[in-house]
Amino acid sequence: MKKLFILAFALGSFSWLSAADTAAGKAAYDVSCKKCHGADGTPVAAIAKMMKVEMRHLGDKAVQAKPDAELKKETVDGIGKMKAMPQVAKDADNIVAFMRTLKK
Ligand code: HEC
């Protein structure tokens, strides 16, 4: 247990050094995005069907080819049938950093 704590702490302080925090991004993603985009970016079929839209995996080449600024804008302002999510604005950089880890 103690070891786990130290590991978590070490990982936490490590990600603190980088500009964007992928761990915090994952936490925010799990709360706000997972229900539609799946834990690893795989679209939830029932959601795509309900919203009547083709959803791409967030790790797809076409999605990953977008610059950070664009992914950030889509995250906060929404895109197509996805509604704007102003509540994630403060975490947007971290969420984008997490989305980069989903690259296939
Ligand atoms: C209610 C379901 C829902 C939630 C919650 C949601 N999305 Fe989406 N998202 C969608 C749908 C549907 C699309 C496809 C929209 C379209 O093509 O019309 C989409 C598209 C996207 C795209 C563009 C992907 C592409 O194909 O280019 C990104 C990036 C994205 N979402 C990120 C996020 C992030 C980050 C979050 C959490 C902050 C989030 N979404 C939350 C439903 C959702």
Image: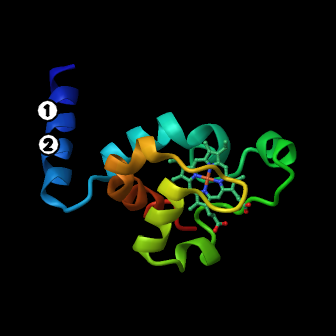
| Residue 78 versus residue 100 in the image, above or below | above
Which element is circle 2 on? Answer: helix
For ligand 1, give the image quadrant: bottom right
| Residue 23 versus residue 102 in the image, above or below | above
In this figure, what is the number of numbered marks? 2
Whole-percent x and y of residue 19? 20, 62
| Residue 62 versus residue 59 in the image, above or below | below
Classify mark 2: residues with Cα within 10 Å, few (<14), some (14-19) or many (20+). few
Marks 2 and 1 sit apart, C-alpha to C-alpha, by 6 Å
Whole-percent x and y of residue 75? 50, 56
Q: Nearer the viewer, residue 76 or 40?
A: 76
Q: Which residue is mark 1?
A: 6
Q: Nearer the viewer, residue 73 or 30?
A: 73
At a point 20% along the width and 45% down the height, the residue shown is: 11
At a point 15% along the width and 51% down the height, the residue shown is: 16
**Numbered mark located on residue 90 in the image:** none
Which element is circle 1 on? Answer: helix
Task: Tell me which amino acid carries mark 1.
Answer: Ile
30 left or right of 8? right
At a point 81% along the width and 60% down the height, the residue shown is: 54
Q: Quadrant of residue 101?
A: bottom left
Type of colouring: rainbow
Q: Nearer the viewer, residue 61 or 4?
A: 61
Q: Which residue is mark 2?
A: 10
Whole-percent x and y of residue 79? 63, 61
Asked if disc 2 and disc 1 are in contact, CB closer than 8 Å, the reply is yes
